[in-house]
Amino acid sequence: MPFRTTEVSNPQFESNNLRFITVKTINLKGRGDICVYVPKGVSKTETLPIVILLHGMYGSAWSWAMNGGVHIKTHELIEKGELPKMIIAMPSDGLWGDGSGYLPHSGLNFEKWIAEDVQTAMIENITGAKPESPLFIAGVSMGGFGALRIGAKYGHKFKAIAGLSPITSLPQLKLFAGEPLKTYAQDIISDEDVLATFKKYHEHLPPIRIDCGTNDQLINYNRDLHKKLEKEKILHIYEEHVGGHEWSYWGKQIISTLKFFVSKL
């Protein structure tokens, strides 16, 4: 068993199709939380896609649901037939400092927690989640950095990947984090940068979508990444929309991201 212990919320007390899972994993040397949107009426014979959504600095497993309302929006679109049934897994980053960066450091592996444990937790606990379930990953800000990095590095696992207002390189964490930059970089050799990671794993890159708000403090970094990706002939979708580095922007753009993922099924 990959987890020493697993706790799952009681469906009797759940609301808005949200379930909560806590597992103890060696990658965190402790417990990690996952908030899960579970669609209604799923049979054991169904195989549903799994979308992993990563939060940004200062947040946790509840951020995507309680700041972005992604579970409510997804449910409405499923009910209208505009999205297929899907499972949305929203893990914490490991709750290290202001944000773990979803990187391996400080004797903990926040990367494998996302790349391996979250999928396993879904398969073990959620009806419709199976080893063959199509897997997607996206995130905002630090979570966008994590989703693009991990999605590229484990490209054989993911059908598509996306970053919403993503941090594009490790030094940008200092715009948000109180911890020293050297803490994040201590165990990393060459893939602490999105472009470098894409180049390193270019042979099995999944389809990529990136968007950023025109008033976002990370807009120039994202424009620079877009230009460099074009220069390297790395296929991707890049969009800009009115908005800042905020949930009102991400709450809208996540729908476009989910529809992009569905187009890759």
Image (tube, rainbow, N blue to C red):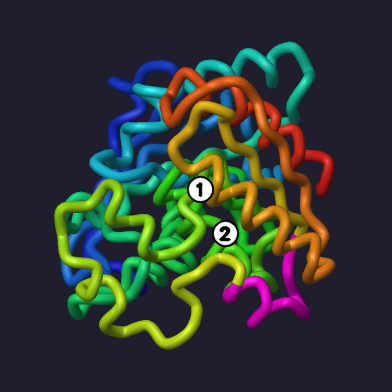
Q: Quadrant of residue 20?
A: top left
Please give the label number shown on residue 148. Answer: 2
| Label 1: which secondary element | loop
The residues bearing labels 1 and 2 have C-alpha atoms spaced at a distance of: 8 Å
At 70% across and 29% down in the image, what residue appears?
256
Residue 71 in view in this figure? no
Amino acid at the residue labelled 1: Pro
Q: Are marks 1 and 2 in contact (CB under 8 Å)?
A: yes
Whether 203 is among the magenta residues is yes
Residue 78 to residue 142: above or below: above
Q: Position of residue 204 (x, y in %)?
A: 75, 75
Q: Quadrant of residue 39?
A: top right
Q: Between residues 258 and 1, which one lies in front from this camera angle?
A: 258
Residue 62 in view in this figure? yes
Q: Earlier in the sequence, mark 1 or mark 2?
A: 2
Q: Which residues are magenta?
A: 196-206
The residue that mark 1 highlights is 166
In the image, 226: left or right of 196? Answer: right
In the image, 236: left or right of 214? Answer: right
Magenta stretch, main secondary structure class: helix
